[in-house]
Image (cartoon, coloured by chain):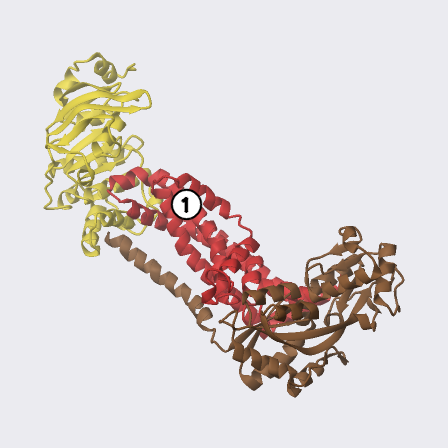
Chain colours: A red, B yellow, C brown
Amino acid sequence: MTDFIDAFRRAVGLIVTLDPSLVEILILSIKVSLSAVAIASMLGFAIGGALAVYRFPGRGALSAILSALMGLPPVVAGLMVYLLFSNVGPFGVLQLLYTPTAMIIAQVVLVTPIIGALTRQACQDLLEEYDEQLRSLGASSSAIVVTLLWDGRYRLITAVLAGFGRAIAEVGAVMIVGGNIDHVTRTMTTAITLETSKGNIALALALGIVLLALAFAVNAALIGVQRLASRFAYA
Amino acid sequence: MLDPTSSLKALDGHLASPPLPIELKGLVYAAGIKRVIDGIDLTIDSRRITVIMGPNGAGKSVLLRLMHGLILPTKGEIRWAGRCTDRLMTRRQAMVFQRPVLLRRSVAANVSHALALRGLERGSRAIRVEEALKLAGLERHASTPARVLSGGEQQRLCLARALSLEPDVLFLDEPTSSLDPASTLAIERLLLDAQRRGIKVILVTHDVGQARRLAHDVIFLHQGRVVEHQEAKSFFAEPRSEGARAFLSGGLVL
Amino acid sequence: MVAPIARRTLLGLVLGTLLLPATSVALADDDNFIIVQSTTSTQNSGLFEHILPKFTKETGIEVRVVAVGTGQALKNARNGDGDVVFVHSKPDEEKFVAEGWGVKRYPVMYNDFVIVGPASDPAGIAGLKEADKAFKKIAEGKAPFASRGDDSGTNKEEIRLWNAAGVDAKKASGDWYLETGSGMGATLNTAVGKQAYTLTDRGTWLSFANKDDFKVLVEDDPELFNQYGVILVNPEKHPNVKAKEGQAFIDWLISKEGQAAIASYKIDGQQLFFPDARPRS
């Protein structure tokens, strides 16, 4: 127990003094996950909105697959991207393996289904209420999608925050495609894994605390958004 | 409260040209095995307010939606001055539903978005939004989230939104059934005003008093069929069918 | 539709701004780096943090180390996912070159393996001078033993010793023989947690910060000698290999400066790796 307390104290020290390696790792983690979520949001909003509004054969199956992919294990997503971007893989010529770009791609694969499925659900719920009125106003399907996406913005923000929470916390995908290279592809989660394996509990704990704080912040933002939404009856 | 004079000034200059006559020929709508609309032949050529009445389940709401093009008939056709119902026809019309349907935006944004869906540029939208809010007596609430308004205010907004589209035909499906008398009065004033402006108003209502106040002609629906269609004066004085008689005297029509 | 297009443009702009971090992250890769496939033991020992900055300072070439097990490192190199491979399993390295995947193997340095275990030493192996005898005693006593189980250089050495001891340890997998399938550090964590013996390279052991009451129990057996080699991935097989920079790294490692850098890496005054490169002929 005393080891833990001692490590905890040293961890707080690293955070308070803004230890440069800690800061470098933190910034990379946020850059990677934020970029991935931005891309995944564009894809997810479009896919989710289209699935809710357009009617076409196979729509139900596609929706089911999208929902199922929410549970895609990060390490499997990482493996898939690794196979694609390895030098002997189909996209090997891009030489993207072991770069932050590959990590972003892997996290996009992970997060898009989450945002997509939640968007689809939000749009579907809204459509139940709005469908007749929007068609009465003469809206085309694409106009309906855009209308629903904006009207569902609070639920969409919730989906984006959920996606970010998933991305920032995963280790399987970024470890495999990034290689945990010092100063290049080392994120908070891969660094925690490494430092733990070296027995460097203090640094691992410091990273863990920061990660936890970030997760709490995201959660608090989520709750804040939901409260705001109900206040304006925008929920 | 609504200023009666303001309603006359708003939407100035626009005189609608509704595509009359409206002809329904052999109209049938079946949901499964049940024929909700069971063969309707109808001609509406009055430019004044037409009221559709009937007991619950008679098919009034479905008839309205068929005419507006929201659902397709199983059989038969609807013609507007000879033209078929299609997407273009739908865009010349507007509908107010029983429960107000407002987007999760401000009062002004709700009207603005409806106009945007019609393809209006930002500049011309602003003018019409202002006029619509004046019409509805909601200028002070332009930035208020639309969904926190009272029921009456919301429905006034829906009607003003519909009118801002400058439709030729306006459908209303029991718009005041859950509203207080003051709001009901406001809505009815707007409908009379719309009529003055040449808009063809087709109103479904349960409220016999409202029908007496507004209707020029009445269509009485029962079990998916048109049982009566005559001028309001004579309909209320001497209903020809037993169903209508029972309905008007407050009894249950089976 | 005017409004939706306008709204879409706005949305696009907002998201485009969010994408700036992505582009900055991608563009930050300038080309002057090599990827070295190496092992977790070498990484965990901290050697790279000590010697690589010296190489980068002298040549301006950045070295990116991907640390996996020896088996995986060689497999990755076969796929061309790396420019240089730096591992410690001579027979596999020679096979790698013989099959044409590598250009030439250079010995670089050596260290040794040690058997570590709990202070209580249930199998009574402390002080034994022959590693295979120690393994035999562990097997006979069914004392818990943590194995890398990951096709690494250390793992291969461990299996050699079991064979020399005439023991089929895999039969007891899940029983007293625990295969972690992990790197050296993670395996050490498991060993300490389970009070199990394990075979580790001295470098990782010395820099490992979670020793609890564990001690080095068996060492200095010539069988525990651990040789490291470095090989340039064959650019004829994979044209993407940065042959010039990769060879520069190899040349530096076996040069006087590189060898001195390796020798100067110490933990608590103890040297971890012993340079033994032959001068280039």
Res C225 → quadrant: bottom right
Q: Nearer the viewer, residue C217 or C140?
A: C140
Residue depicted at 76% across the width and 67% down the height: C200
Horizontal and vertical percent position of residue A187: 56, 65
Res B156 → quadrant: top left
Residue depicted at 26% across the width and 45% down the height: A140
Residue depicted at 35% across the width and 51% down the height: A150
Horizontal and vertical percent position of residue C178: 75, 55
Q: Nearer the viewer, residue B64 or A163?
A: A163
Q: Residue furthest top?
A: B242
Residue depicted at 62% across the width and 70% down the height: C98
Residue C219 visible (yes or no): yes
Q: What kind of residue is marked 1?
A: Arg
Left or right: A36 with respect to C113? left
Q: The N terminus of chain B lies in which quarter of the figure?
A: top left
Q: Residues within 10 Å of mark 1 (few under 14, many from 20)?
A: many
Q: Chain for mark 1?
A: A
Horizontal and vertical percent position of residue A184: 54, 71
Residue C214 visible (yes or no): no
Q: Nearer the viewer, residue A168 or C135?
A: C135
